[in-house]
Amino acid sequence: MDTLIVAISQAGDFEWLQKAGVALNKNGYVQVDSVTLETSAPGVYAGGDAVGSGPATIVKALGDGKRIARAIRAKFEGRAADGQKESALFVNRAEFQRRRVTRKFAVKAPERAPKDRRDFDEVVNTLSQRIAKEEASRCLDCDLLCSYCVGVCPNLALFTYEHAPICKTLPLGRIKDSRWFALDGETIKITQRYQVAVFADLCNECGNCVTFCPSAGKPYKDKPRIYSRRDEWERESNNAFLLERLADGAAIHSRIAGRTHTLSLNGRIDYSSPELDAVWSVGWELLSITAKPNAPDCERVSLRPVVEMMALLNGLRGSVPFIPLMENS
């Protein structure tokens, strides 16, 4: 960086940025691109408390700094702006399996001899560039493809499906007196191409997947649970999904925190939640959002379930041809 400004004030002064041609949003903070965090002034980036709705957390500021760094590298190096590796799009699953059955031990960090430790210099030395690359190559890239739980499930209830990475900016709003008011936009991304789901009909919750999960998760509970019968799905209160075949498309019904959401693809995208109904064209052009007549007042209503249900529905239909779809009655 060329300049570092240390500030301890309680509010930001953005007047000097406006004079430099940087646009502000309706909240009075810096307006940025939702992916790259670049401002309206080319080559100028902003993050942390200066953007969005203002002061948040140190963690968010750190995350924004990493996103900005990735975006700058993308501009000069031609990388993906969201930081995803090229292999995130197409993974050689056979190569992944080969790597996982080949055991490679960690490199032992070099240390100074005990007789040389009579000062305040570091005892543990750094790795050479060659050794560091060798150590990093041991990574199994579980962020791209894991599926350990699929291989250890004795009932074949867990399975891997594939979907195209999706990134959509949808309205974020509130409901007052049964009317919808748009507040801002919310960008939702699902970038990991390979996902895991559960056939609830086959799962007896034995816990084998929990034992082998490298991230200490509970796949039979955490992963989307797919049901083939409406009566069983209706008895669930959370993380339950039901797929339905329509005349010219399909629908997915979900139970999330005791609430029912429905998304249907039938020449357009229709979404219904306990608070509202929304319609998009197949090209994601927003056609309408209306609050339901008796919808309670809500200060913040997110449409995140739309993207999550779309990714699940398209992924299952496209890569798991034997997925059971309930017939429309």
Image (spheres, rainbow, N blue to C red):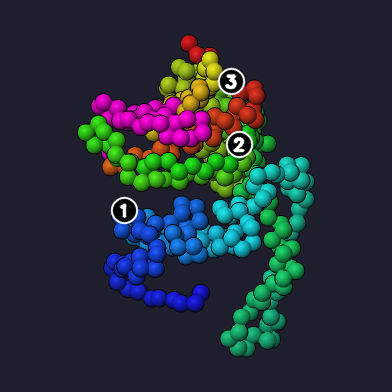
Question: Badges 3 and 1: C-beta atoms under 8 Å apart?
Answer: no
Question: In the image, is 3 to the left or to the right of 299?
Answer: right
Q: Which is nearer the eye, 118 or 82?
A: 82
Res. 175 mark = none
Q: Is residue 268 visible?
A: yes
Q: Find numbered disc 2 in the image and state the secondary structure of the residue it sits on.
A: loop
Res. 26 mark = 1
Q: Which residues are magenta?
A: 270-298
Of the two numbered discs 3 and 1 on the same chain, state the one appearing first in sequence.
1
Q: Which is nearer the eye, 327 or 141?
A: 327
Q: Is residue 225 above or below residue 84?
A: above
| Residue shown at the point (48%, 11%) measured from the top left | 329
Is 291 within the magenta?
yes
Is 170 within the magenta?
no
User: x and y percent of residue 5 in the render?
Assistant: 40, 76
Question: In the image, is 302 to the left or to the right of 74?
Answer: left
Query: What amino acid type should be assigned to the residue bearing mark 1?
Result: Lys
- Could you say which quadrant of the image residue 148 lies in? top right
Q: Which residue is mark 3?
A: 324
Query: What amino acid type should be assigned to the residue bearing mark 2?
Result: His
Between disc 1 and disc 2, the foreground one is 1
| Residue shown at the point (43%, 21%) measured from the top left | 234
- Could you say which quadrant of the image residue 318 lies in? top right
User: x and y percent of residue 96 in the render?
Assistant: 73, 46
Res. 163 mark = 2
Of the two numbered discs 1 and 2 on the same chain, state the one appearing first in sequence.
1
